[in-house]
Amino acid sequence: MIDTWNLLLGGFATALQPMNLMWAFIGCALGTAIGVLPGIGPALTVAMLLPVTAKVDPAGALIMLCGVYYGAAYGGSTTSILMNTPGESSSIMTALEGNTMAKNGRAGPALATAAIGSFIAGTIGVILLTLFAPLVADLALKFGPAEFFSLMVLAFVTVSSVLGASMLRGMVSLAMGLAIGLVGMDSIAGIPRYTAGVPELIDGIEFVLVAVGLFAVGEALYSVLYDPKGENAKRNKLTSIMMTKEDWKRSWPAWLRGTAIGFPFGSVPAGGAEIPTFLSYSAERKLSKYPKEFSGEGGKGAIEGVAGPEAANNATAAGALVPLLTLGIPTSATAAILIAAFQNYNIQPGPLLFQTSGPLVWGLIASLYIGNVMLLVLNLPLVGLWARLLTIPKPQLYAGILVFATIGVYGMRQSAFDLVLMYVVGVIGVVMRRFDFPVAPVIVGMILGPMSEKQLRNALSIAQGDWLIFFKQPIACTFMVATIAVMFVPIILRKRGVRLAEDD
Amino acid sequence: MQKRWQIGIALFVLMLATVFAVGASQLQSDAGYAGIGAAFVPAVVSIFLGLVGALLMWQALSGGYRNFSDALIGVASDNRGALWVTAGILLMAALITKVGFVLGATLLFTCVARGFGSKTWLRDAITGAALVLPVFWLFTLVLDVNLPRLFNDWL
């Protein structure tokens, strides 16, 4: 305990250096901006920013990228409340209640409860991360290849089956991601696979290219094909952000409940913030003393319905850092790209991270505390400024997104051919979007595929080729059983009338 | 039309499965202590692709993809817009090393804005350049990312 405290203090010493503070601020501001803007999410932004890892020191770059990841969870609520067009799918629930409140002249309190709730949930989430991450890392030190392999299988099966409307289409996306991940040199024997004699392919397919192609080019082409004018959603008027005493009284318990629901969901590899926000919303609706105010009942919008899901959303974002930092397991496309950022510095997130790169991790965790404060300031008094981003016309917005996309892709290898490849991936992305294939499993499969193959082959080498090793060891066996159980989650949810969609 | 697309996608996945299976069968690898070599996972992935491809085909032929409703998605309307976006990206890819990043990206910006229905191309070009220039300086002068230049570090 005392150890953790000292390490965290050391982390603050890193995070409070002026340069790192600046990176945190840039990350938080960028994250809020992309959270507000429709059509651009944290996964794409982090992917486009990866070239900065070439020059910036690891602490600064990772602090900034985490700020983007974190800030996006804050910014999403602004668009939902003011325009009823959720910037990210995890803010769909916020849109439901928040937009109704805004229509009835209460946009200000809705934005305030969202921002303060995000701050409280985010801060509690980071405190829990501080306490639990070292414990999980210690536990994970006992993991061998068999445990890691079964955990990775659990992670990609969950991401593919829980995201999106159809498990089969999720699995198709995953299979494609795994296939792309196979291209290049195999990590154990050093044999080139599926390179077709092209020397560039020996390093594998750059996954920034795939991410940017799917997210930026795919999104732009999809949008121009299917929705060129954009819905001329009516903007609600921004009102005073002051919350009444009553608002506070009703928000508090909702914030805490949202946090309690969100954090555990983030920290298990369950993929996305959608299920926890949904659960939080339905809990608030059931528990509320004012059920008539909920939009579903034709009411004027209940503040609990904004407070709970927004808190759950941010707590999930903090929770997802636990498996990311301690096990090296990404639970979303954004997390997968963050892993790539670590790998650019030859740092492998996982149980050893806390020992080999202690100052870096603790600096990162400390920066999350600071980031939460920054985001509260950015999102409360300055909310009017961010709302102005919504006036950027669609043509210039998408033109700008694509310019940044090309920097991200071209900056990696200085190859004009990569730009053509990015376009081709973008076209595939349009087809995927059109036929409702989730995109995140492709990215997660690409990153986790090669990692899990390595673990599989190491595990089998140790066990002398005995496949039962994955069921003989209790931890590995638990993960395997959980994997099978997870496949039933979408079926159960669908029976209860929940339609899942993709985040990022 | 709809059905043909769904079958086409399933065929694409099955084709990918075949390509990966053929590739896996040609990989030489020593199995070692693990009992599996470099060809094992590719084989598994190709079987996985084949399996999901076959299921997708079955769904496409028996009434369409499940839990999928066309009503949720609009009808493609603006092919010309998509052509402008395509032209922008491909032109940039073709010209970037010749005219430098700044001009290439400005061209991209103008084309994409045109694709999304903007009619003020001169204003778009100026907006584009105003966005691209500081970004170019940030990446080349501060972050040391190598982007093609027309004359020097400033352009």
Image: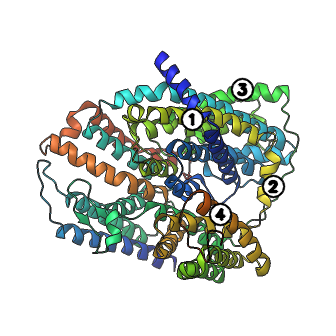
Extreme residue in the front direction: B152
Left or right: where A441 falls relative to B41 = right
- Distance Cα–Cα, label 4 vs label 2: 26 Å
The residue tagged 1 is: A262
Mark 2 or mark 3, which is nearer to you? 2
* Residue type pointed to by label 3: Trp
For mark 3, give the secondary structure: helix
A442 or B126, which lies in front?
B126
Crowding at label 1, few (<14), some or many (≥20) Cα neighbours within 10 Å? many
- Where does residue A483 sit, x and y in percent of width and height? 35, 43
For mark 2, give the secondary structure: helix
**First in residue order: circle 1 vs circle 2:** 1
Protein chain holding label 3: A
Q: Which residue corresponds to the image point at 35% horizontal and 27% vertical from the top-left? A: A139
Asked if marks 3 and 1 touch (Cβ < 8 Å), the reply is no
Tell me, for residue B137, which label it has, or none. 4
The residue tagged 3 is: A252
